[in-house]
């Protein structure tokens, strides 16, 4: 079993300068702990709680910035797509296409993503059982593209609340596809602030530790130099100043669990 | 308060002949009980559980068939849309655009639907609290289109199960928008058959009675002459042979509750 | 099918004078609408959220007051029991023993209650599926006592929230035992006020209408002349001043549904 | 922070000979890994799904066997109590009284347990939020007994299913009381076999690893030499042959997390 990869970055692409600053900080932190990483950022927030929330920088400029990050830092980059027509252009700029949780059953989007040949990280819908992700993966695999990752980011639990059923990690792993744990959106409180989603940043670290102790292929953590001022997902993002110490702890757990399992 | 309207039809448009047969049967039943009705059918099933499931007749032919139903039977028609680009063409053929539950937070789709000026029936996402639908409605209303209907179709309750929180009906009604109760998809067991969704047709009638006794503007019931052979949603559709007696009962309840409330 | 019975009274026995006043008011209201009723009140609140909450008047005095109500008003009376040793004494004073939801799996309590030969109203645990109540009823029936009623009062739905799955009513009715809908505790928000349970009194009426439209043998409603000053369950009790109009509406629905079903 | 303690034993006391054999096997395994342990076993299963299920050996004989285990193996012993009258006699024989999850709100039981002065392990009810356990602990602490442990064993999640919300561990720890993770009952499927509870033994190890990686004071694991033939909880108990390797892994994780946190 390989060490986990970190999927990491600020929720939104705020500007070219901001993206580069974040990538530089992350690169340093990941290099220090010997962690492979994929830079994640979104060019569009297509399903915000409220219409008044900030949407993002747009696809064209966003993809150009991500391509620049890839070139400058030599890291793979990931972004999310929201319609079939976005898949081909996004695939030219990024290494991994991500399917948002609400859209994980949209057949045309899954097929268009699969057809690019890029790796696909599919978030498990908040309304889906972990075993139902086998059907989702099969839609993508039908294009001949088997580079699928299945991502846990919480399941609906009453109103405005998500819960991580940690059994879902081994259940999804039984498909044979690598499993990702999204520690950021798992602590989201959807719609919990009325016109915006709330979050519980204090649980990012314990939940990430729990997932790594079970065994995952990747951990997904959004980070920002000042989350409380970020244009989206502030309540759930980890301050970049805390990323290094969390990463050291996760690496130690990962090594222990994967050595022992071997 | 007005009597409830029935939104009714087979899940999928199977063929022009089938659509007309269903509309004729429904027309007779609704006329007999003096119920206003809107014909519902889908040209595409865009988020089936499994890739192998039947998708539908396609947008162009489907819209043409619906326009024909409208002309022949003099009834409004409704269909669901799955991307912003479908809204304008669909709006030329139908009176009501429907937003699927999984897509009820997709801002671009809500705006494109709103901009057509057509009435919009938005299904509450299985992952949303009823009060969160105020934000969904506000996205549509931002286009100047206030012809919004909010539709209850169940909320995630553990795995492969939905529950109707009947409190959601008055909570959504407090927005001022008319509330629809979808008795068909509320009895769905998502993914419950492994490669397909299961359903509990036997609960369509009691749940519809409960919703009407609380008070709703419309009831949504999918029907088919032979549900067990239908290409989709068979386990949840009501045999058309049972529609008349259910409708009589719902009408009597509706009259009683709305008279009494007045 | 018989018309529904109303199980009704203040949550706690506050004093002999208060119990008589409530019974007198209820008697008048029920007589006016021709509704059969059972007087309900508790001598002990054995599982309050917080230790500081008021417990009740005690078993001896409470049972004596209930026996007095029965004699004076000629109505059956109901109270809840919390341990096997309370069953026999309670059965001397009351017609119906009630098993609290948290205790619905405690074998010794169910057997002791059954052995009294009295009718038993068992609340479905918030943690139980409706079909699991068949095993609960079987424990009581093993004593030779088949006078069992199964009562819906909400199921856990995330934290501090209950939901009524209205499918549970016909599911429990399939056991052959009469089904009760508890409209008061269904709108409880357990622990929702920190040191006490909250509640949503505004949903008592719509949920009761929904249950009656599905069809139940009894409706359970706690009432008080001034709920906001009651020592327990204030947020969920119905002001007695509103009982009459709700009862008229429920009676009309009940008649309609049961006539039609026949 | 101290290393975790293991609460361990067969679900039921089957016989004196069986209890001694299990304790001997456990003692050897725990000594090998330097783990402190508390022997757990029940003298009565007071809330079985079905009446036909086996109840247990009875209080008098059961307590005598547990006292014998304590003397012979020099370990503390734990058992569960189901009514206030059992607390004092049980406290003479055992070191820790356990409050079952269904009974965690029964004030009289909590007070009687607290008054013994023994340590109390309270299971969090499947119907309670983790923050609600502060009120439960306060009931016990009102007796002057602060030796309280709060135990996670799953929360209701739809029907016949529990989920561990791992955030509950730090939330309960914030009360200041030590937190226990019950890996056995967390994988229970209540009522999932119709007349009995099912279980998913395969998730005991991953969930225990997750909890230890978050950080707990104790882990609770029921074990048996042949779980599939055990009179209760067979589907969730760990074969004693697998206990040693799991314990080694948990110890390594615990050391890592607690060293790092320090």
Image (cartoon, coloured by chain):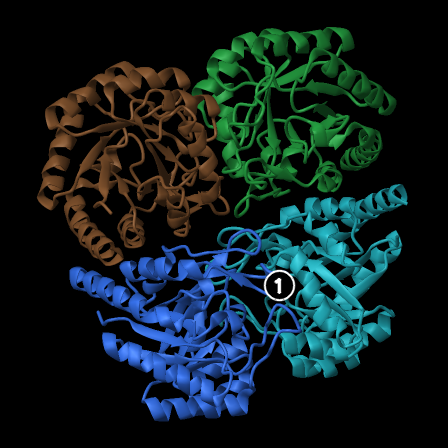
Chain colours: A cyan, B blue, C brown, D green
Residue located 80% across and 65% down the image: A38
Q: Quadrant of residue D1?
A: top right
| Residue at mark 1: chain | A
On screen, residue B254 versus residue D10, left or right, reads left
* Residue B201 rendering spot, x and y as whole percentages: 44, 62
Position of residue A157 relative to residue D111, above or below, is: below
**In which quadrant of the rendered view does residue D66 lie?**
top right
- Is residue C58 shown to the viewer in this render? no
Mark 1, residue position: A230
For disc 1, the neighbor class at 10 Å (few under 14, some 14 to 19, many from 20) is some
Front residue (pair D110, B9):
B9
Residue that appears at 56% across and 56% down: B160
| Residue A136 at x, y percent in the picture | 68, 67
The number of discs equals: 1
The secondary structure type at the circle numbered 1 is loop
Q: Quadrant of the C terminus of chain B?
A: bottom left
Image height of D128 relative to C259, above or below? above
Q: Is residue C160 left or right of residue C81?
A: right
At 13% across and 22% down in the image, what residue appears?
C71
Percent coordinates x, y for residue A119 in the rendering: 79, 70
Task: Please indicate, yes or no, whether residue A99 appears anywhere in the rendered image.
Answer: yes
Left/right of residue C30 with respect to residue A11 in the rendered view: left
Q: Nearer the viewer, residue D85 or A197?
A: D85
| Quadrant in which the N terminus of chain B appears | bottom left
Q: Position of residue C134 (x, y in %)?
A: 45, 38
Check the image and report above or below for B134 versus C122.
Answer: below
| D228 in relation to C175, above or below | above
Using the image as rendered, state which of residue B25 and residue A42 is in the foreground: B25
Residue B70 appears in which quarter of the rendering?
bottom left
């Amino acid at each position: 079993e390989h060490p986990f990869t970190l999927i990491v970055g600020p929720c939104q692409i705020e500007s070219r300068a901001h993206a580069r600053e974040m990538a530089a900080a992350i690169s340093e932190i990941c290099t220090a702990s010997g962690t492979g990483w994929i830079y994640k950022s979104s060019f569009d927030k297509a399903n915000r709680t409220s219409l008044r929330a900030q949407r993002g920088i747009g696809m064209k400029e966003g993809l150009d910035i991500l391509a620049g990050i890839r070139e400058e830092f030599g890291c793979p980059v990931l972004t999310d797509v929201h319609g079939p027509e976005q898949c081909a252009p996004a695939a030219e700029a990024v290494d991994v296409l991500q399917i948002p949780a609400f859209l994980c059953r949209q057949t045309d989007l899954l097929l268009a993503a699969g057809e690019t040949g890029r790796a696909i990280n599919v978030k498990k819908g908040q309304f889906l059982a972990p075993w139902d992700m086998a059907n989702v993966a099969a839609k993508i695999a039908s294009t001949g593209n088997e580079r699928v990752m299945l991502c846990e980011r919480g399941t609906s639990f009453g109103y405005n609340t998500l819960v991580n059923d940690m059994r879902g990690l081994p259940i999804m792993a039984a498909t044979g596809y690598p499993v990702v744990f999204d520690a950021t959106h798992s602590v989201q409180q959807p719609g919990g602030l009325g016109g915006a989603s709330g979050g519980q940043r204090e649980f990012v670290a314990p939940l990430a530790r729990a997932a790594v102790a079970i065994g995952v292929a990747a951990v997904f953590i959004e980070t920002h130099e000042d989350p409380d001022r970020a244009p989206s997902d502030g309540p759930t993002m980890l301050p970049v100043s805390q990323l290094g110490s969390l990463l050291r702890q996760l690496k130690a757990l990962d090594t222990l669990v994967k050595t022992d399992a071997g």
